[in-house]
Image (cartoon, rainbow, N blue to C red):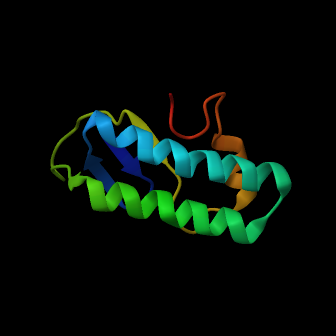
Amino acid sequence: MIVRILGEGQYDLDDHALDALNGLDNQIEQAIESGDEEMFRTALHGLLSAVRASGTHHSLDSLDESDMILPPPDATIDEVRELLGDDGLIPG
């Protein structure tokens, strides 16, 4: 799967990485629901770090469509709230 971090680029990840990412995604959702800015920031940075650590950079000259789009590290809690779908940022 191809995951894009806005403003940073795309990463190729194996499907098995979704389980770990879903746990961090749940933390982001909980932080948004409770309005906990510190928990939100920690969970968002954890999610983005996990994508970077478990993925490899997707070719910069590729025009492949992303399977998931994640907010940039400096996104606000309100901006991410608008991006959330029924399954959070990470489907599944």
From the viewer's perspective, tell me whether residue 84 is left or right of residue 60. Answer: right
83 on left or right of 33: left
Can I make out residue 7 in this image?
no
The extreme right residue here reads 34
Q: Residue at x 30, y 50 (%)?
A: 10
Residue 70 lies, in percent from the top left, at 49, 49
The front one of 24 and 72 is: 24
Number of dots carrying numbers:
0
The image shows residue 20 at horizontal and vertical percentages of: 43, 47
Q: Residue at x 63, y 42 (%)?
A: 83
- At 43% from the left and 39% from the top, the residue drawn is 19
- Residue 54 on image: x %, y %: 28, 55
Give the residue at x 61% y 37%.
88
In the depicted view, which residue is nearer to us: 27 or 91? 27
Residue 18 is drawn in which quadrant?
A: top left
**Residue 12 visible, this angle:** yes
